[in-house]
Image (cartoon, grey):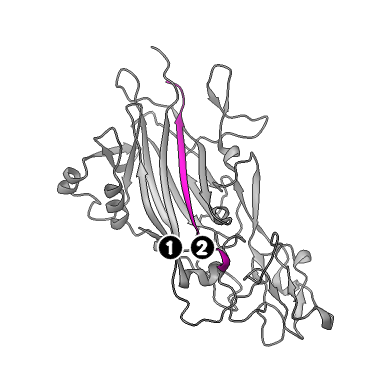
Amino acid sequence: MTKEKKLSLRLSLLAGLALMALLGSTAGSLAWYAFSRTVSLTFVGTSVATSSLLNVGLVDTSDGEPYFDDDDLVTYNLEREEATEGTETKVIYWSKSRTGISLLALRHYLEQSPYAVDKLHPVTTGSREALNDTHEFKLFRSPEVSEIEFEHEATTDSYCVLPLAFRVINEDQEYVASKNIWLTDAAIGAEHGVENSVRMFVQGSSEVLVKPADNANQIGETKVGGVLSLGPGEYYDYDNNMKEYCYGEFETPKEDITYSALEESEYDVLDNMNGVSNPSEQTTFYAKHHSGVLVPDIDGAVPKVQKHYGIGKIKPSVSSEGEFYVDTTNGNGVPIATTTTNSKIAFATFTIFVEGWDHSIIDQNAGYSFNLDLKFEIDRI
């Protein structure tokens, strides 16, 4: 049997930010906290390609009626399969066409699901390790002023979930077990840094949080605690005791965070309390201290972080024979899914969302767009 070249599969997500009227609002900044009320992220195209060596299918996650009925299968040129692993049976829709699942089929799928069809709203995960965190993965909605703990889960229509199935076919037209599926690239293009806010949580062979715009072989961090300007005006929020709110998560218990008064000359001056890169004008993360307020020692409190993998951390290393492998020396290579011995199908669920704690999600960037192109490859057959 001859060895085939690795196959590239592309999942393209094209999205744009659509700005809505602020209806006379005088709020100085939006970021994700007000973003969800005034700005939405719109998918304008989604496609999944396929080939004779690697098929990609959509997994039906409905509790009742299937996402595609018999007439839909004919309309979208799909076939339904029930695959059993252990005691669990999953319904999968595969394309009958070599061109893969069509845009219309994918849109129909998303319309039947409880998740976003064509609009995303910035949310946050809170603190998290990059790989195989033992905490349940949750996304939280934007807080209101004074909601210092983020406890309200985001509605499912705020983010996109794509449960995908993969099967590898050899030259004898047989399905192959124990073959890894790799995410080897995530080309993302955007304007004015909007791409930095995009995250993917992949649940397959491992659970891994990925920042597609980060191409390095590294673990990046996003702070999930700080002082914020959520209300109208240009000042960081503060309570009736004239103490600024500490939003999000910190290593220090909030009741133990120390506060101090500023010099009079330090009030009403833009102050970078959240580590914003190259601040130039006021945002939710970069604002002023109101006269007479007490300011917390943020650095001493130590904001917690959300850790993510860069794409270079996901990519496998390649041997001199062209084989993919996990490089324990350099610490990179995470297969997203592996075909099983029983059904010979691999499963991976992609949750795609916009991270509100990222400093690129500010009102100055509203209206800009991004596009995302995911590249999958398989081990040699």
Q: Which residue is mark 1?
A: 158
**Horizontal side of residue 269 vs 328, given as left or right:** right
Q: Which residue is mark 2?
A: 123
Residue at the image position 55 percent from the left and 36 percent from the top: 334
Q: Quadrant of the N terminus?
A: top left
Asked if labels 1 and 2 touch by Cβ distance under 8 angstroms, the answer is yes
Magenta segment includes 164:
no
**Horizontal side of residue 41 vs 198, given as left or right:** left
Q: In the structure shown, which secondary structural element does the residue marked by tag 2 occupy?
A: loop
Magenta segment includes 375:
yes
Residue reaching furthest to the bottom: 240
Residue at the image position 30 percent from the left and 17 percent from the top: 172
- Pointer 1: residues within 10 angstroms few (<14), some, or many (20+)? many
- Pointer 2: residues within 10 angstroms few (<14), some, or many (20+)? many
At label 2, the amino acid type is Val
The residue stretch that appears in magenta: 363-381
